[in-house]
């Protein structure tokens, strides 16, 4: 099927211009003024902006965690992503200690195959690096198209690897030009503070925040960048939240080391004052926790200076009933936050409309940079001849209010309840097919395609 989109304002990471886009099957085949072509369907995008489909490189769908599971599966999660303009997500396959990488991959494939509505890829979270795992790395990168591997510096006994394992992992991944990402918080410091607060009877959600002060993230980020510098591996820090950690990225840059960094919408827009709401604060219990106003200013500055390349969601929702598992003990509250649907509209409303970022910077941090860093460019992340026709037709003026009553995420509360947003995703195309139009879903479960990535 062919589609002609006329009169749209096309915005990429590099350009901003008025033109038509002609799509045949799943690709963009021509872009130009007043295209004279015959199409099966024509869309008038007058007074609308057209962005590349969003890429969210940090989501956790159908993930077992703390005795429960994230409440969005691959069907509901990618559906919510589409309504918010995100056409591709990258989820994390998590190795179980003692098991192979391939065993974990098969487990995640059983959850995702034939279930997604938008396109998807995988990172690998390595929790037990050993000789058998070392032997699997090459095939993961070259055969399976999984080129990025995550390590945890916290969650001792469950997910965390030690520094010697980290160095071994880095050295192996470097051989095949992959990239190592990290959850950079000091697990030992955090475990000490959690135990201290609990022994003192301090059990409310506030103490989740107070158990993970800025130094726990800054120290681990610096240690990770030092190890990446030693091994020479490409490196990426996920969900960076604070000024102290950002300064470690800056210090790495001063010695001519490139460390990619990601932050998340919630860290740019919400702050730690939300931990003063009694148990309702459990809605915002995530790791790392929300930070201070000064950290928000640092993060926006980091985006504009190029120290932070990506804004993801770290979407990991839990139902309120599951959050209540920690009603009497903050350490038992499942860590996670629903955000996959609102990432792009919030960043436009709070970023572009408030002159914190430009239109092109918006496209960089929501799509283009993730495509480049994680080996999907130019197939994804841009509007160009030959690229996948993943497009968002966006009304920059439409106002709407965020609410759990209207969102599509499988979560019975919203961390942004009542937020007034200006800018609305109107029509979303995935590989040349209209997936959402005027708040109606037009694709079925299974339309989403697994994307093999290039190292």
Image (cartoon, grey):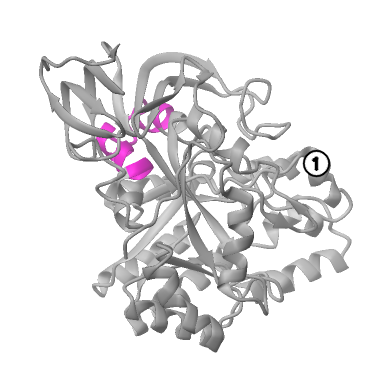
- Above or below, 170 against 285 in this view is below
Q: Can residue 288 be seen here?
A: no
SS category of the residue bearing label 1 = helix
Identify the image quadrant of residue 237: bottom left
- Above or below, 145 against 421 in this view is below
**Residue 138 location in percent, x, y?**
40, 76
The residue sitting at 38% across, 45% down in the picture is: 300
Q: Say which of 352 and 73 sits in front.
A: 73
**Residue 425 location in percent, x, y?**
43, 23
- Above or below, 108 against 342 in this view is below
Q: Say which of 236 and 46 sits in front.
A: 46
Where the N terminus falls, by quadrant? top left
Is 332 on the left or on the right of 178, as rendered?
right
**Residue 360 location in percent, x, y?**
25, 36
The residue sitting at 44% across, 36% down in the picture is: 86
**Residue 62 location in percent, x, y?**
66, 49
Q: Does the segment drawn in magenta span residue 360? A: yes
The residue sitting at 29% across, 25% down in the picture is: 50
Which stretch is magenta? 348-367
Is 17 on the left or on the right of 444, as rendered?
left
Q: Does the segment drawn in magenta span residue 423? A: no
Q: Say which of 93 and 420 sits in front.
A: 93
- Above or below, 315 against 455 in this view is above
Report the residue marked by disc 1. 278
Total of numbered circles in the picture? 1
Counting other residues with Cα less than 10 Å from the Cα at mark 1, is it few (<14), some (14-19), or many (20 or more)?
Answer: few
């Amino acid at each position: 099927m062919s589609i002609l989109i006329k009169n749209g304002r096309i915005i990429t990471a590099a350009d901003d211009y008025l033109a038509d886009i002609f799509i045949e099957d799943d690709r963009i085949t021509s872009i130009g003024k007043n295209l004279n072509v015959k199409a099966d369907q024509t869309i008038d995008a007058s007074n609308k902006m057209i962005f590349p489909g969003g890429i969210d490189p940090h989501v956790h769908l159908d993930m077992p965690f703390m005795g429960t599971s994230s409440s969005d599966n691959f069907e509901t999660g990618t559906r919510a992503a589409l309504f918010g303009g995100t056409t591709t997500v990258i989820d994390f396959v998590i190795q179980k200690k003692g098991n192979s990488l391939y065993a974990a991959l098969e487990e995640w494939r059983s959850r995702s195959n034939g279930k997604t509505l938008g396109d998807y890829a995988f990172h690998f979270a390595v929790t037990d690096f050993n000789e058998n795992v070392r032997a699997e790395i090459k095939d993961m990168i070259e055969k399976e198209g999984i080129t990025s591997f995550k390590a945890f510096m916290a969650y001792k006994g469950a997910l965390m690897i030690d520094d010697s394992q980290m160095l071994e992992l880095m050295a192996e991944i470097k051989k095949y030009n992959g990239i190592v990402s990290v959850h950079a918080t000091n697990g030992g410091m955090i475990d000490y503070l959690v135990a201290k607060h609990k022994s003192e009877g301090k059990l409310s959600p506030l103490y989740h925040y107070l158990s993970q002060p800025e130094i726990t993230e800054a120290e681990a980020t610096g240690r990770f960048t030092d190890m990446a510098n030693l091994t020479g591996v490409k490196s990426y820090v996920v969900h960076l939240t604070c000024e102290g950690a950002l300064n470690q990225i800056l210090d790495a840059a001063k010695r001519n080391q490139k460390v990619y960094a990601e932050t998340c919408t919630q860290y740019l827009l919400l702050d730690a004052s939300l931990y003063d709401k009694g148990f309702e604060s459990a809605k915002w219990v995530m790791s790392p926790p929300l930070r201070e106003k000064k950290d928000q200013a640092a993060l926006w500055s980091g985006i504009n200076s190029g120290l932070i390349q990506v804004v993801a969601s770290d979407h990991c929702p839990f139902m309120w009933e599951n959050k209540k598992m920690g009603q009497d003990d903050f350490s038992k509250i499942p860590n996670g936050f629903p955000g996959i649907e609102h990432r792009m509209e919030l960043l436009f409303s709070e970023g572009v409309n408030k002159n914190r970022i430009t239109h092109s910077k918006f496209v960089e941090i929501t799509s283009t940079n993730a495509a480049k860093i994680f080996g999907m460019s130019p197939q994804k992340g841009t509007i160009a001849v030959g690229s996948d026709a993943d497009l968002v037709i966006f009304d920059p003026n439409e106002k709407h209010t965020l609410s759990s009553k209207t969102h599509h995420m499988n979560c019975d509360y919203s961390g942004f309840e009542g937020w007034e947003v200006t800018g609305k995703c109107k029509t979303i195309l995935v590989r040349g097919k209209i997936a959402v139009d005027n708040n109606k879903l037009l694709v079925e479960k299974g339309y989403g395609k697994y994307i093999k990535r290039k190292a």
